[in-house]
Image (cartoon, rainbow, N blue to C red):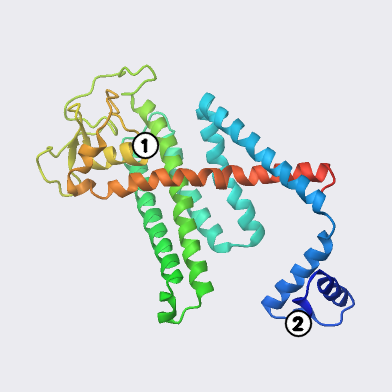
């Protein structure tokens, strides 16, 4: 069987002819032989379509260029609507493909993430804002951020170990180890991006609801010295004291915050400014202290890398679908 399939196009047509005449049972073939049969069928089907294929490639390139220009202009002119649409597509597009492919493991994690995040986002958009909501929001997305980062690192490590053949020491097949590593890497990147975007949306809602932030940049009410500007709750631990659960941090503008509040505001919500006076936050100064902010340094770099995934997950499937629609209208296969 393998010798029949490995010949050139003419042999591939003959193999396809034999397959249609039921000269052998496809179900009895090995995965490699099945792939060769499908490869032979594809060659036979597309033989003589070189001009059509060139036209399809040209349509794809032109569509990608135009789509890039449109997305860049949309993001520059109407960033808020662009971010909302991108966030919605990041959340929904993988659901369609994974449901179609029956990837139940991803669907389970997606359902858990969606339920918890929907509850947290619902709490963040309520008016008046409950006093315990900001800490709940920030701690959930901070936890999600740590989990996604650790998952991505483990996945990347497994992929690298597989490339160097370390998986053979544990008698694990290369394809199994690579699938496991790529899956973990995807989970870490996907939920890392999605969590950051939901965190930013919740941070915007809470910032306006708390009352210390306005679009003009002027505070809408006075901030007492012993009140955290993010959550509006009293600060019980002095900046110079070591807290049992969390410490207190003072920005360069002399405003004080709970540790989890300012972590969530600056890192998870990507707000590099004081929630009260909107003075720019010096992240390098925050990171100079090895505790408790030492883990934030790789996370900031990691967050910049996550931005590349948005286009691939949210917009690339839409563009490819649009290209397929054009090909269908023009009668191209």
Name the spot of residue 107 as percent of width and height, x first: 56, 58
Q: Real-space Cα distance between discs 2 and 1? A: 59 Å
Q: Secondary structure at mark 1?
A: loop
Q: Residue furthest right?
A: 21
Residue 74 image-quadrant placement: top right
**Which residue is at 51% across, 27% downward?**
76
Quadrant of the snapshot with the N terminus: bottom right
Side of 71 relative to 177 (left or right) = right
Q: Secondary structure at mark 2?
A: helix
Name the spot of residue 115 as percent of width and height, x first: 49, 49
**Which residue is at 38% across, 26% downward?**
208
Residue 19 drawn above or below residue 309:
below
Residue 273 image-quadrant placement: top left
Name the spot of residue 268 as percent of width and height, x first: 36, 41
**Which residue is at 56% across, 28% downward?**
73
Side of 256 relative to 218 (left or right) = left
Q: For the residues carrying marks 2 and 1, which lies nearer the camera in this image?
A: 2
Q: Alpha-carbon neighbours of circle 2 within 10 Å: few (<14), some, or many (≥20)?
A: few
Residue 100 drawn above or below residue 312:
below
Give the residue at mark 1. Answer: 270
Q: Decide if residue 333 is in sight here.
A: no
**Which residue is at 45% across, 82% downward?**
171
Q: Nearer the viewer, residue 221 or 64?
A: 64
Say which mark, if any, is on residue 172. Answer: none
Say which mark, if any, is on residue 3. Answer: 2
Q: Alpha-carbon neighbours of circle 1 within 10 Å: few (<14), some, or many (≥20)?
A: some
Residue 283 image-quadrant placement: top left
Lower sequence index among marks 2 and 1: 2
Side of 30 relative to 241 (left or right) = right
């Amino acid at each position: 069987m393998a010798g029949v399939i490995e010949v050139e196009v003419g042999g591939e047509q003959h193999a396809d002819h034999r397959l249609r005449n039921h000269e052998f049972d496809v179900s009895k073939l090995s995965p490699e032989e099945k792939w060769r049969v499908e490869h032979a069928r594809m060659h036979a089907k597309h033989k003589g379509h070189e001009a059509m294929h060139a036209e399809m490639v040209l349509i794809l390139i032109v569509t990608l260029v135009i789509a890039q220009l449109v997305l860049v202009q949309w993001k520059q002119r109407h960033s808020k609507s662009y971010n909302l649409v991108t966030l919605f597509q990041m959340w929904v597009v993988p659901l369609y493909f994974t449901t179609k492919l029956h990837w139940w493991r991803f669907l389970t994690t997606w359902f858990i993430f969606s339920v918890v995040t929907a509850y947290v986002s619902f709490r963040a958009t309520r008016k008046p804002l409950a006093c315990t909501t900001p800490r709940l929001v920030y701690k959930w997305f901070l936890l999600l951020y740590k989990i996604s980062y650790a998952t991505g690192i483990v996945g990347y490590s497994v992929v690298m170990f597989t490339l160097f053949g370390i998986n053979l020491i544990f008698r694990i097949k290369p394809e199994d180890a690579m699938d496991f590593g790529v899956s973990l890497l995807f989970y870490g990147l996907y939920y890392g991006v999605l969590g950051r975007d939901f965190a930013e949306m919740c941070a915007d809602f809470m910032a306006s609801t708390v009352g210390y932030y306005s679009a003009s940049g002027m505070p809408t009410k006075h901030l007492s010295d012993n009140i955290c500007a993010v959550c509006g709750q009293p600060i019980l631990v002095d900046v110079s004291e070591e807290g049992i659960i969390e410490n207190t941090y003072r920005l360069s503008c002399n405003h004080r915050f709970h540790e989890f509040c300012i972590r969530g505001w600056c890192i998870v919500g990507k707000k590099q400014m004081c929630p009260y006076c909107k003075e720019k936050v010096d992240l390098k100064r925050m990171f100079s202290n090895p505790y408790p902010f030492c883990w934030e340094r790789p996370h900031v770099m990691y967050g910049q890398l996550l931005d590349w995934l948005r286009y691939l997950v949210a917009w690339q499937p839409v563009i490819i679908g649009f290209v397929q629609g054009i090909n269908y209208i023009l009668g191209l296969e």
